[in-house]
Image: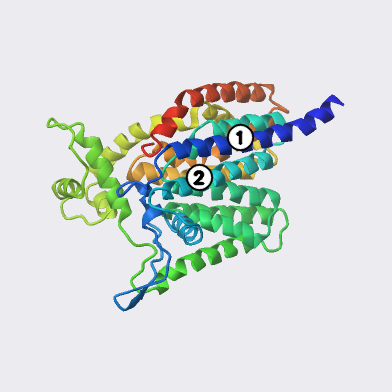
């Protein structure tokens, strides 16, 4: 009887946590400014994207977002479509987009926790780790949209959604940024290999549907006059901003007073003369580039630790003993692929910010927690490690929660 009551109680507690976290998070967002930060803040995509078909100076104009824009294609389409349907003003738009992103992020995380973790108490621990992290406040909201669709991709694979719908989740995740396209395609390939090993006669279906969705979303940019879905030289701008910031602080003259385009162009012409893109910098000035990579690693490591906190320990245990996993082994490999495809490029081009880990954090928590519970059948310490690190991480998160909300755009 007591076990039956617990079985009914835990889902209610988890649902109550979801509702409470959504309401409290929305209240905190509404305490912040409703005005979208302007350029160069990446959140500016929410205001600048315009999907309305309009006529200016005798010409019809439709601006389809480019993949290298700050909002990518996915987040820009979400914000643009939202503005076409829901009335917003300049003073309230940021509230709308941030609350929408928060709802999707926490809602998909809740669903992911229920899908990947069998133990009801561990589900509660995992969801608390996600909602108390404060990551739902992060700006730009594009990182939350990316995390939401990564969560939904894992849920779709776990629950066996129709192939076309699962591929859609992977495609819209991939279209958040250029590097995520690689992750989406590799995930589809790996899943096809696993399906082939399990006797599926059409293991390539997920990959084919994913590629079809990607082409469908990229096609308008190719077809519209003057639009380039891959347009921009964002990698060079990101690299030069980080290079100027990192090394400027170590100059005898002190740090630059700003990181405007004039200063970055001056540094590029002085240190990397004759270069027009990042590839030329790497090939023509490899020593200077690898000096930057070392500094980037030193800046990235503390952010990675601060983002993952003590949950990196159970994740490491799950990776180390991954051969003992049964149901979660494919999802662990998918997570590692996503980490490699999203964080390594950031390290090589700029540095890993805390917000870059946001899109992966729910999966890290769910797979680390679920994996430790699987391992606990043969390794009694796995459950102890999980709960000790989980409680320690909750305390760490609670201490920095106000900081995450107050400085949401600088993480």
Question: Is residue 210 rendered to the left or right of residue 72?
Answer: right
Which quadrant: the N terminus?
top right
**Residue 376 or residue 119, whichever sits in front:** 119
**Residue 153 or residue 402, whichever sits in front:** 402
Secondary structure beneath dot 2 equals helix
The residue that mark 2 highlights is 99
| Residue at the (58%, 59%) spot, across then down | 168
The residue that mark 1 highlights is 20
Q: Position of residue 243 (x, y in %)?
A: 25, 41
Give the vertical position of 180 relative to 106 (above or below): below
Question: Is residue 376 rendered to the left or right of residue 406?
Answer: right
Q: Residues within 10 Å of mark 2 (few under 14, many from 20)?
A: many
Question: Is residue 249 rendered to the left or right of residue 182?
Answer: left
Secondary structure beneath dot 1 equals helix
First reached walking from the N terminus: tag 2 or tag 1: 1
Q: Position of residue 233 (x, y in %)?
A: 30, 57
In the rendered image, is residue 338 in sight?
A: no
Q: Position of residue 197 (x, y in %)?
A: 69, 53
Give the vertical position of 309 relative to 140 (above or below): above
Q: How is the image coloured?
A: rainbow
Quadrant hosting residue 204: bottom right
């Amino acid at each position: 009887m007591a076990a039956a009551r617990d079985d009914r109680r835990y889902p209610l507690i988890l649902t109550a946590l979801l509702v409470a976290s959504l309401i409290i998070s929305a209240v905190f967002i509404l305490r912040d400014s409703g005005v979208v930060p302007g350029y160069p803040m990446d959140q500016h995509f929410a205001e600048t994207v315009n999907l309305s078909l309009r006529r200016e100076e005798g010409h019809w104009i439709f601006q389809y977002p480019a993949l290298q824009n700050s909002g990518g294609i996915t987040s820009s389409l979400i914000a643009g479509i939202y503005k076409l349907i829901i009335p917003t003003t300049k003073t309230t738009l940021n509230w709308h987009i941030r609350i929408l992103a928060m709802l999707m992020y926490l809602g998909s995380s809740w669903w992911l926790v229920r899908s990947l973790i069998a133990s009801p108490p561990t589900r509660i621990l995992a969801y608390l780790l996600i909602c108390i992290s404060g990551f739902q406040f992060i700006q730009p909201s594009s990182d939350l949209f990316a995390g939401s669709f990564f969560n939904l991709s894992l849920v779709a694979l776990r629950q066996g959604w129709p192939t076309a719908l699962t591929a859609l989740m992977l495609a819209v995740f991939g279209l958040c940024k250029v590097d995520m396209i690689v992750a989406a395609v590799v995930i589809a390939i790996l899943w096809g290999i696993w399906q082939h090993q399990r006797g599926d006669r059409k293991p390539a279906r997920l990959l084919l549907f994913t590629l079809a969705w990607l082409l469908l979303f990229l096609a308008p940019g190719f077809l519209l006059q003057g639009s380039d879905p891959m347009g921009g030289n964002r990698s060079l701008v990101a690299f030069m901003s980080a290079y100027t910031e990192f090394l400027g602080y170590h100059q005898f003259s002190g740090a630059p007073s700003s990181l405007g385009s004039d200063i970055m162009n001056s540094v590029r012409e002085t240190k990397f003369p004759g270069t027009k893109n990042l590839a030329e910098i790497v090939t023509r000035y490899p020593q200077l580039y690898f000096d930057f990579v070392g500094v980037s690693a030193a800046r990235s490591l503390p952010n990675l630790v601060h983002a993952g906190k003590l949950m990196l320990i159970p994740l490491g245990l799950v990776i180390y003993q991954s051969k003992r996993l049964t149901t979660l082994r494919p999802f662990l490999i998918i997570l590692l692929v996503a980490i490699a495809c999203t964080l390594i490029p950031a390290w090589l081009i700029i540095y890993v910010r805390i917000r870059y880990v946001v899109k992966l954090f729910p999966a890290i928590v769910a797979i680390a927690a679920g994996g430790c519970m699987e391992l606990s059948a043969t390794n009694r310490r796995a459950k102890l490690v999980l709960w000790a690190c989980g409680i320690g991480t909750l305390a760490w998160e609670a201490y920095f929660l106000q900081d995450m909300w107050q400085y949401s755009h600088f993480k």
